[in-house]
Amino acid sequence: MQSSPNTSAATTVLDARDVEAGYAGKTILRGLNLHVRRGEIYALLGANGAGKTTTLSLFLGFLKPSAGTVLVNGVDPFGAPADARRQLAYIPENVALYEHLSARENLAYLLDLARQHADSRSIDGALSAAGLQPEAFDRRLAGFSKGMRQKVAIALALARQVPVLLLDEPTSGLDPQATAEFNRLLNLLREQGVAILMVTHDLLSAADVADRIGFLNAGQLVEEVAASGDDRFDVRTLHRRYTELGA
Ligand code: ATP
């Protein structure tokens, strides 16, 4: 684990600079500087109420910063929300999909809504790449586990070929095997060059997949650490630092 190096602006896909933001006059983010590069997994850690989901809301264009700049692949998500959303896939803690539709139908419908043409071969290819078993392709989502729903959401991101993936607590409630499978999918997306910002309380997953980890405390990024090569994060060191920082 080492202090994170400076980033070349050329590869920065998610960029928040000197951002102040909050709700109804209450400032939550205080001078946030955070960037995620192409082909990078960034885990944002922090205590309840630190402002992690608020950070995602900025990139999603749900919240206007009162100061600073927010860019998603060069697009201001508040100024041009439709353009910014075309750049990204967002997977909330509980994936919202159409319960009465099958996995195939969900993908076909949601890709159609995104005005993205996809034939049945590419839909099946995305579902397979996301690790969904073929016998589940035509089953209604209503009977799917949380892990299976996430696979459908990842398949949608794969089919849309978006450069950005935002995740809010993706592994909460997943069993260890489903978590490992999910992390494998994140690695696959990273290999495709996707910039991934993951908000999480799951230190083990962060240690497992993240290239960089940021600790958010009361709306400020108080520390960033980077994995170097094959030298992964040590979960005990992460936990100790998390506690020390009061993140
Ligand atoms: P958690 O780990 O509990 O999900 P978090 O780090 O994601 O926490 P946020 O959800 O970003 O934290 O919330 C940061 C602060 O902003 C909290 O004090 C919360 O009560 C407040 N907050 C969040 N959303 C709103 C909202 N829509 N209106 C008013 N206050 C809000």
Image (cartoon, rainbow, N blue to C red):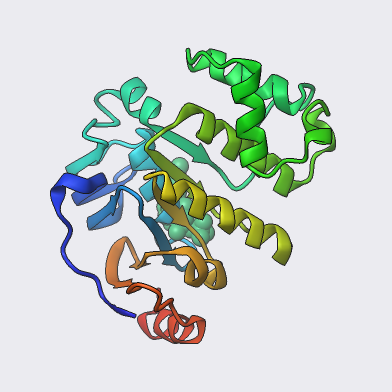
Question: Is 188 above or below relative to 212?
Answer: above
Provide residue 183's location: percent of width, then percent of height: 57, 58
- Determine the residue positioned at 33% across, 41% down: 58
Q: In which quarter of the image is the N terminus?
A: bottom left
- Determine the residue positioned at 37% across, 37% down: 163
- Determine the residue positioned at 38% across, 86% down: 244
Q: In which quarter of the image is the C terminus?
A: bottom left
Q: In this view, does 55 lie to the left or right of 126?
A: left
Provide residue 109's location: percent of width, then percent of height: 63, 16
Q: In front: 235, or 82?
A: 235
Q: In front: 67, or 132?
A: 132
- Determine the residue positioned at 35% across, 50% down: 39
Count of marks placed on residues: 0
Residue 40 lies in quadrant? bottom left
- The answer to whether residue 110 of the structure is visible from this angle is yes
Provide residue 195's location: percent of width, then percent of height: 36, 47
Q: In front: 230, or 107?
A: 230
Q: In this view, does 96 lie to the left or right of 53?
A: right
Provide residue 234's location: percent of width, then percent of height: 46, 82
- The answer to whether residue 174 of the structure is visible from this angle is no
